[in-house]
Amino acid sequence: MPSDPGITEHTEGVLNLWTGSWIAALCVGVLVWALIIWCVIVYRKRKDDNRLPVQLRYHLPLELLYTFVPIVMVGVLFYYTAILQEEITNPDAEPDVHVTVYGRQWSWDFVYEDEDVWDAGMPAELDGTMAPAGDLPTLYLPVDQTVEIQLRSRDVAHSFWVPAFLYKEDLLPGVENEFVITPGEEGTYLGKCAELCGEYHGNMLFNVEVVSAEEYEQRMTELREAGQTGEMGPELDRDNAADIPDPTVVDEGAEN
């Protein structure tokens, strides 16, 4: 898995769930392979033996076994998945930081709600590498602080994915999604859109910078001094922006 258990408070749980799922799948696979090989060897047709094998029906213990064992396995995996998802999407802890992420064709806008500042990104310029050298939209998060990330789409379906966090959440038009994380290690983590959203879907890259509290406050100050303050909300969505008249278009009827 492309992650370390300490990057967020949830990565260890996700790793354990992923590992457990593969162990369960491997056990099922070994059992199925063993039964197939056993049947091929024991019940193979022998030379000069034209008799039909014994026909069995209504083997109740066997039928109960292959009915309830898969149900129990699926139920256990579902239980632990639901518990982990609930911890991520509906945590008990009150968030220290609130950030709204807007996805749009083909970049990202980050609004730091507590600081009343925002940062608008530009589409990445791809150079054939996993991490393009050019400036990417960057989301800043303070280390060891609980962050609520609200996800909104300005146009079509997108998906916010940071592989190192082992979590992905969709951004859907008209739907408000959110999740909570507590970054535990400073560093730069590459993120991307994981939902095919149009011609330049591959350009929707971004970085997540997990920094100290001092560096986070410094970045907020830089955005404030750059004049990037105030609202940058749903009024800029594609559907809402279509209602805003373009001042460069002349209404010929108004001149008559």
Image: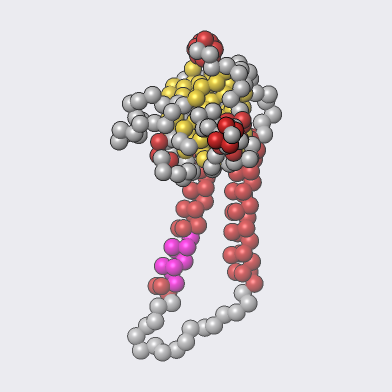
Give the main secondary structure of the magenta stretch: helix
Of the pair 98 and 45, the residue shown nearer to us: 98
Of the pair 138 and 216, the residue shown nearer to us: 138
Residue 158 is situated, as x and y percent measured from the top left of the image, at 52, 40
Whether residue 78 sits left or right of residue 183 in the image: it is right
**Which residue is drawn at the image coordinates 44% and 72% (left, top)?**
39
Task: Give the mark count.
Answer: 0
Residue 57 is situated, as x and y percent measured from the top left of the image, at 60, 79
Of the pair 229 and 69, the residue shown nearer to us: 229
Q: Which residue is at the far left?
A: 128
Residue 48 picture quarter = bottom left
**Which residue is drawn at the image coordinates 64% and 37% (left, top)?**
176
Residue 107 is situated, as x and y percent measured from the top left of the image, at 46, 32
Q: Is residue 121 above or below residue 16?
A: above
Say which quadrant the N terminus sits in. top left
Say which quadrant the C terminus sits in. top right
Q: Is residue 216 above or below residue 38?
A: above
**Which residue is drawn at the image coordinates 68% and 24% (left, top)?**
94
Residue 58 picture quarter = bottom right
Q: Magenta stretch? A: 31-39
The reply to whether residue 152 is in sight is: no
**Which residue is drawn at the image coordinates 45% and 36% (left, top)?**
106
Q: Is residue 180 magenta?
A: no
Q: Is residue 37 magenta?
A: yes
Residue 188 picture quarter = top left
Of the pair 133 and 214, the residue shown nearer to us: 133
